[in-house]
Image (spheres, rainbow, N blue to C red):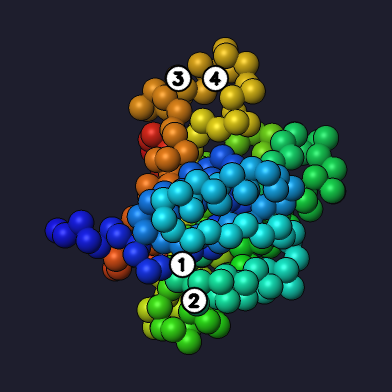
Amino acid sequence: MSLEKFKLDGKTALVTGGSRGIGKSIALQLAAAGANVLLTYARSAEAAEEVVRQIQDTGRKALAVQADAVNYSEAEKVVAAAQEAFNGLDILVNNAGITRDTLIMRMTEQQWDEVIETNLKSVFNYSKAVIRPMMKARSGSIINISSVVGIAGNAGQTNYAASKAGIIGFSKSLAKEVASRNIRVNVIAPGYISTEMTGKLDENVLKSIEAQIPLKRAGDPEEVADAVVFLASGAASYLTGAVLNVDGGMAM
């Protein structure tokens, strides 16, 4: 097998929620594989511009755009900005997401709505916005970031689990709609990944979580990003509607 298939030279990628955590690693790894990258962010302008600088240091083009993930008209503007800046759009990574964890007896309607809208409606917004140009080009790769929680569930995360399970069903349905136009739609379901957020957990809690993982460790954001690069590349040209678990075996 030629390693050339893994390269993304000349491609353009859009990554939602690309300023930190897993999204940041995805943006950087796509650039390292050769893609120009537009990333969106909600509030962290400074962090987003730092990711842009790191990408530009590799010789690739990059742009950061502030956008509300739940607003469809903003998604349309972001897609248009990517096409204008980079003369096309080949890869979409729907990564934007939040948590509002609590038991359902304590969960407010607002906590439910915020998670469903940010995590699930954003996938609809950006997927719908890119479909027309991808269909016109008769090519494209959409990669949606779900979670092992969307597969196995987790107490205290009914809202998050519902949003992430919804992403899987959405992706499989969309994959069937657009396969004839050579547009592939796949899902990555990360498990417990070390990020700035998880780093704030108590050490005993971390050890308890890791003990439940068959590989006995948390994953790195780069390991999720590597899976994204694979699915975006020609090496995955016969994969669509797939769910790739990057979870150390948690969902087995």
Quarter location, residue 138? bottom left
Badge 1 density bin: few <14, some 14–19, many ≥20, Cα 10 Å: many
Distance Cα–Cα, label 1 vs label 3: 39 Å
Distance Cα–Cα, label 4 vs label 2: 42 Å
For marks 1 and 3 on the same chain, the one whose residue lies earlier in the sequence? 1
**Up/down of 37 relative to 182, above or below:** above
Q: Which residue matches tag 1? A: 12
Say if mark 1 contacts mark 3, CB within 8 Å.
no
Quarter location, residue 108? top right
Identified by mark 3, the residue type is Ala
- Picture residue at 62% right of the left edge, 72% below the top: 81
Foreground pick, 118 / 241: 118
Identified by mark 1, the residue type is Thr
Camera-side mark, 2 or 3: 2
Q: Which residue matches tag 2? A: 88
For marks 4 and 2 on the same chain, the one whose residue lies earlier in the sequence? 2
Q: Left or right: where does residue 195 sit relative to residue 70? A: left
Q: Left or right: where does residue 102 sit relative to residue 243? A: right
Say if mark 4 contacts mark 1, CB within 8 Å.
no
Q: Which residue matches tag 3? A: 211
**Up/down of 58 relative to 4, above or below:** above
Say if mark 2 contacts mark 1, CB within 8 Å.
yes
Secondary structure at badge 2 equals loop
Q: Left or right: where does residue 214 sit relative to residue 116? A: left
For marks 4 and 3 on the same chain, the one whose residue lies earlier in the sequence? 4
Disc ID at residue 206:
4
Foreground pick, 120 / 33: 33
Distance Cα–Cα, label 2 vs label 3: 45 Å
Q: Position of residue 42 (x, y in %)?
A: 72, 51
- Picture residue at 37% right of the left edge, 59% below the top: 34
Distance Cα–Cα, label 4 vs label 3: 9 Å
Q: Residue furthest top?
A: 204
